[in-house]
Image (cartoon, grey):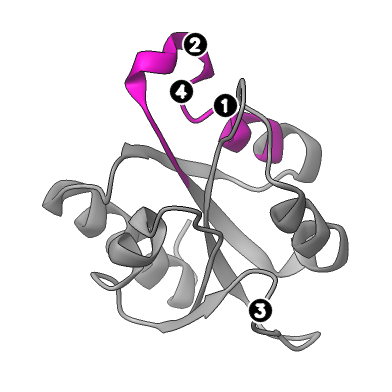
């Protein structure tokens, strides 16, 4: 599975290294028309979706099987809000909001989600 990562500080990349898959960077690496991917992105400002993530999803949202969003719980209701926006606007399941580079339980949850999707489980 392709793991598309939009990371400003490197936390998303560090998270992705705990997953099995081909890690690609949003805005730098390309995907093909028929390639499915899982998205790791972030919120910025007051919960906005990064423009680089928007550009990817405007082209390839139909290939995205799910999204996990990094954030900081200090932002209260805006913690990981970009994931909620993505879920609503693009109909992509928000699988997880996480802080920093995530924790083992976060990595395991995403790994299991991806495996289930690859095997056709809902």
Q: Quadrant of residue 37?
A: bottom right
Corner quadrant of residue 65: bottom right
Q: Residues within 10 Å of mark 3 (few under 14, many from 20)?
A: few
Mark 3, mark 1: which one is toward the viewer? 3
User: Residues at badges 4 and 2 in contact (C-beta under 8 Å)?
Assistant: yes
Across and down, in percent, residue 25 comes to 56, 74
Q: Is residue 66 left or right of residue 101?
A: right
Tell which residue pokes out farthest to the top in this image: 76
From the image, give the main secondary structure of the stretch colored magenta. helix
Residue 28 is labelled as: 3
Q: Is residue 63 above or below residue 68?
A: below
Residue 81 bears which disc, if any?
A: 1
Question: Do callouts 3 and 1 mark residues in contact (Cβ within 8 Å)?
Answer: no
Binning the other alpha carbons within 10 Å of mark 1 as few (below 14), some (14 to 19) or many (20 upward) gives many
Q: Is residue 73 magenta?
A: yes
Answer with mark 2 or mark 3, whichever residue precedes in sequence.
3
> Is residue 120 or residue 95 the one in the foreground?
95
Q: Is residue 40 above or below residue 2?
A: above
The residue mark sitting in front, 4 or 3, is 3
Image coords of residue 57 (percent x, y)? 77, 58
Which residue is more in the foreground, 97 or 52? 52
Of helix, strand and loop, which one carries label 4? loop
Label 4 sits on residue = 79
Task: State the image quarter where residue 107 is shown.
Answer: bottom left
- Disc 4 and disc 3: Cα gap in Å? 26 Å
Residue numbers of the magenta segment: 69-86
Identify the residue under disc 2.
77
């Amino acid at each position: 599975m392709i793991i598309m990562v939009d990371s400003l500080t490197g936390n998303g990349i560090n998270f992705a290294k705990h997953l099995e898959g081909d890690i690609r960077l949003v805005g730098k690496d390309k995907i093909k028309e028929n390639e499915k991917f899982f998205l790791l992105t972030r919120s910025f400002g007051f919960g906005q979706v990064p423009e680089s993530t928007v550009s990817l999803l405007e082209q390839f949202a139909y290939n995205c099987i799910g999204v996990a969003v990094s954030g900081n719980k200090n932002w209260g209701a805006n913690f990981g809000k970009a994931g909620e926006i993505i879920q609503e606007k693009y109909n992509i399941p928000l699988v997880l909001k996480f802080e920093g580079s995530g924790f083992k339980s976060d990595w395991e949850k995403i790994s299991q989600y991806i495996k289930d999707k690859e095997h056709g489980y809902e």
